Image: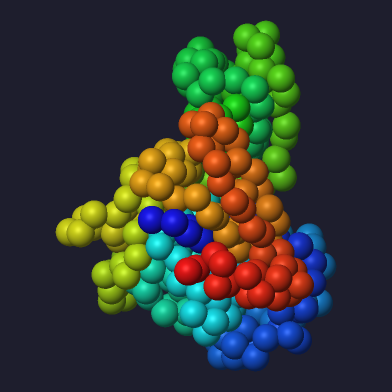
Amino acid sequence: MKTVFLYAGQGSQKAGMGKDFYEAFPAYREVIDSLKLSFDVKNMMHEGELAELSCTEYTQPCMAAFAAGVTAVLKEEGMIPDGACGLSLGEYGALHAAGIFDAETYVKITEFRGREMALAAEGKICSMSAVLGMESSIIEDACAECEPAGFVKLVNYNCPGQYVICGDEPAVAAAEVLLKEKGAKRCIRLNVGGPFHTKYMESAGKKLRAFLEEISFGEPQITVALNATGDFYKHGENLKELLEIQIQSSVHFESELRKFLELGADTFVEIGPGNALTGFVKKTAKAMDKKVTTYTIDTAEDLKTLISKKEEIFS
């Protein structure tokens, strides 16, 4: 185990995303041009306003299209990782990289998932807040203490000292006050499209499961870690059931990173947009006293630089 691909989650999207890749890499362009969705995915990515691109039903397939295109270029260059994982939506990018489904299927699944998550979020007055500088166990206890104000839980275990809570607005507000009293450095409100990875996504999970039952999954060709378990996928596990669970349960990304680091992974490549995940890797590695090298593919120039180093990275 040496090299791991990381796939970014919702929230990393940006206006114009992928346009430079489309112009620079034929393999990327071929993936984008082959997609047939309910909207013009290329136009949304390249020309769409950020506000519209940030609507869940558009964000997810656009992020997936970007990741599928970049993965195609990496594969063409012979840059195959030993393992892969992703944050929330990004998990589907990891599954695609592992060979479980092709690019077309990958993007179509995320289009369905995004639409159903957006529908499940309608009418819910919920918030999400990143909690910095505090142990996860204290955050879990604080959420339990705030139950009288409503539902709130720890939904993202990102890395040591960075976790995310989500739930009913009054309960999240109460938890923020309590967490600051308990010593949290900061609580930062996140601009998200709904109460993701909570019980409010149950209806979306059921519909996703039914949709996935009509799709054939292959076996992973590389090691892949899963959000719902925080562990590696094991042969024989019901992946479709785990994806249903993932949409409505906490994301154990820190645990996934720890598993890869324990296995000897020392090079992590984030397929963005954005660079949040490499930050999580560095903090987790530091907590484990491990040395890592990280790369971020946010622009076409980033990808060209990575390709120039492929003999060194993938030897």
Q: Residue at x 70, y 56 (%)?
A: 274
Given residues 100 and 109, the one toward you in this image is 100
Decide if residue 95 is on the left or right side of residue 146: left
Residue projecting furthest to the left: 236
Query: Residue at 66% of width from left, 48% of height from top?
Result: 276
Residue 116, x across and y down, in percent: 50, 61
Which sits in the foreground, 179 or 102?
Answer: 102
How many marks the image carries: the answer is: 0
Please, is residue 183 above or below residue 66 in the view?
A: above
Question: Which quadrant of the structure image shows residue 160?
Answer: top right
Q: Give me the residue at 47% from left, 19% from top.
A: 137
Q: Is residue 208 visible?
A: no
Q: Front-most of 211 and 187?
A: 187
**Relative vertical location of residue 243 with respect to residue 228 in this rendering, above or below:** below
Residue 269: give x, y in percent of width and height: 57, 59
Which percent across, then down, holds residue 176?
A: 66, 20
Q: Position of residue 141 (x, y in %)?
A: 48, 15
Q: Is residue 240 visible?
A: yes
Task: Quarter of the image for the N terminus: give it.
Answer: bottom left
Query: Residue placed at 70% from the left, 26% from the top?
Result: 187
